[in-house]
Amino acid sequence: MTIGYKLDNATFNIIIHCVTVSPIENQFQTKYTHGMFSELQKKFRPMINYIITKDHEEGYIFTYKIIKEIEHNDKMFDFMYEVLFDSSTSNVCCQCHLFEPKKILCRHSLFVLGLERVKKLPNKYIHDR
């Protein structure tokens, strides 16, 4: 029996609770390993430090601006991200492109999915353990 298998087996019956009431977070909770779910939860926590606005709408495609305000040396700086949301498919695309290498949605995309009240994510965003 490998160490990884023992660890997975030992934590199988432990439930990591959701930090929000988001059905999206709940969907990840049931599909992801504890490690993957814990990493995803880190993206739900800092939502209060962001300003989110719907910038443009064309048909089913909405463009959101996600602004993070950061204070450094008594000066405020804004970091802006743009997220495209297709309301007909619930697909999201963020300009940070963090989803591509890690296969875990970025917090910017999660913010938009929450605002749009997406209850169930497309399967391409949920990966096997």
Image (tube, rainbow, N blue to C red):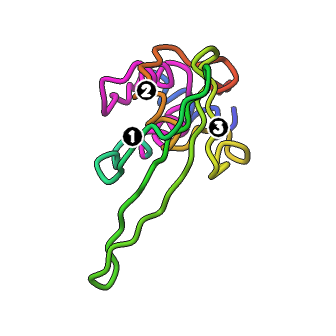
Q: Name the residue type under label 3.
A: Cys
Q: Which of marks 1 and 3 is nearer the N terminus?
A: 1
**Where does the magenta region start and end?**
14-42
Label 2: few (<14), some or many (≥20) within 10 Å?
many
Question: What separation in Å lies between label 2 and label 3 (alpha carbons)?
Answer: 18 Å
Question: What separation in Å lies between label 2 and label 1 (alpha carbons)?
Answer: 8 Å
Q: What element carries label 3?
A: strand
Q: Name the residue type under label 2.
A: Glu
Tell me whether circle 2 and circle 1 mark residues in contact (CB < 8 Å). yes
Q: In this view, does 47 lie above or below 59?
A: below
Q: Mark 2 points at which residue?
A: 25
73 displayed left or right of 114: left
Q: In this view, does 100 lie above or below 90?
A: below
Per the rendering, the mark at residue 44 is 1
User: Residue shown at 48%/19% (left/top)?
Assistant: 27
Q: Where is residue 113 in the image (x, y as percent from the top left)?
A: 48, 28
Per the rendering, the mark at residue 93 is 3
User: Residue shown at 28%/48% (left/top)?
Assistant: 48
The dominant secondary structure in magenta is helix
Image quarter of residue 52: top left
Work out which quarter of the rendered image holds the C terminus and state it. Answer: top right
